[in-house]
Amino acid sequence: MRRLYIDQKKPDRLAEHLKLLDGMEEYQQPAGDRFYAANYPHTNGQNCDQCDTHSVVDRPARRNHRMLHFHYGNIASGNYVPKDVIIQDEYSNDPKLNVL
């Protein structure tokens, strides 16, 4: 995220806030987060304990921990979360839906 001003004397409030969150236990990253190849079919369980670990894809390291992305548009919501990545990709790539 770029600052809208260049004056270095002004505090970077976003950086200060993010620094506060780093030490808070309740705001830590999940320990068991796994990412699977997009073409891997999800097993129909509550979690991915039965999924094939050979299909896990490494997430590239973040270049900048302060890099923020904002989405302007619709965010799909409802009482159903498709766990099948292929179906998720179909929804996210459909220009008529324009959803995140």
Image (cartoon, helix red, strand yellow):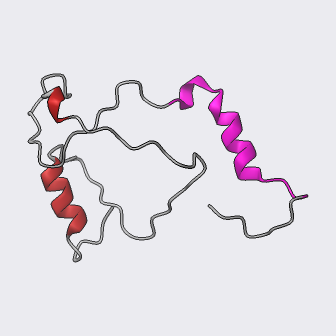
Quadrant into which the C terminus falls: bottom left
Task: Quadrant for the N terminus, please.
Answer: bottom right
- Give the percent coordinates (x, y) of residue 36: 21, 39
| Nearer the observer, 16 or 44 | 16
User: In this image, 86 relative to 35: left or right?
Assistant: left
Percent position of residue 13, x then y? 76, 51
Residue at (20, 71) in percent of width and height: 94
Q: Is residue 60 above or below residue 26?
A: below
Q: Is residue 64 above or below residue 26?
A: below
Residue 27 within the segment the image draws in magenta = yes
What's the magenta region? 9-28
- Does residue 38 show up magenta in the picture? no
In terms of depth relative to the viewer, which is nearer, 66 or 18?
66
Where residue 41 sits, quadrant-wise, is top left
When asked about the image quadrant of residue 74, the answer is bottom left
Position of residue 50 relative to residue 72, above or below, is above
Residue at 22% x, 46% y: name it. Answer: 81
Answer left or right for 81 relative to 24. Answer: left
